[in-house]
Image (tube, grey):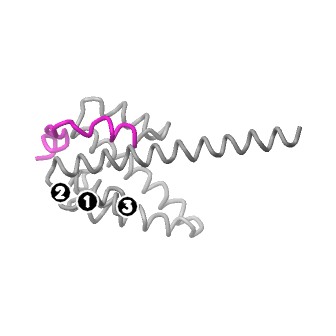
Amino acid sequence: MEILLLLLMGGLGIFLILIGIVFYILKSIGLATLAANKGIDSPWLAWIPVADLYIAGAILEEMNLFGIRFTNLALWIPLIICGGAFLQVIPIIGWLVAVCVFIFGIGFTYNLFSMYTENAAIFTILSVFLGLWAVFIFVIRNNKPGKMKWISEYN
């Protein structure tokens, strides 16, 4: 019985690793294609962890979140995500940082999707709750960027 349980757990572990690899490949292909279509230098950086955050930020370029305009997202996205990961270990402050990074990530995801699809809200919700961000980045990879909603609302 213990052997069967170990085999089942091992099989589940291998399955989850394979799903992770597939998602990584989908995300990298999607970001690299979006970057190449937008004319961003070195779209191959989408295959490198942390550098892929730079590419994602460079694709969106800027966004408005709660009245705060973030420009140069190619710099801000890696800084906020990586900095937030390091600061999360600090008691109490780490929890607040985690919430802020989570909210910023949702705003970034929505703005990125709204640039390429009319289904931005559903893509964002499914990305947050089911972890399907990589799949949707792959799905929108060949879409042409449209007018972002926040530009018309705040300019």
Q: Where is residue 85 drawn, in percent x and y?
A: 49, 64
Q: Where is residue 44 drawn, in percent x and y?
A: 28, 58
Q: Distance between the residues labelled 3 and 2?
A: 15 Å
**Which image quarter: residue 52?**
bottom left
Q: How far apart are marks 3 and 1 (CA)?
A: 17 Å
Q: Mark 1 points at which residue?
A: 73
Q: How far apart are marks 2 and 1 (CA)?
A: 13 Å
At a point 45% along the width and 64% down the height, the residue shown is 84
Q: Mark 2 points at which residue?
A: 40
Mark closer to the chain start, 2 or 1: 2
Q: Mark 3 points at which residue?
A: 48
**Is disc 2 placed on a helix, strand or loop?**
loop
The kind of residue on which mark 1 rests is Leu
Q: Is residue 39 above or below residue 149?
A: below
Tag 3–tag 1 contact (CB < 8 Å): no
Foreground residue, 25 or 126?
A: 25
Q: In this view, does 5 lie to the left or right of 63?
A: right
Front: mark 2 or 1: 2
**Is disc 1 placed on a helix, strand or loop?**
helix
Q: In this view, does 19 lie above or below 49?
A: above
At a point 20% along the width and 36% down the height, the residue shown is 143
Q: What stretch is highlighted in magenta?
A: 134-155
Mark closer to the chain start, 3 or 1: 3
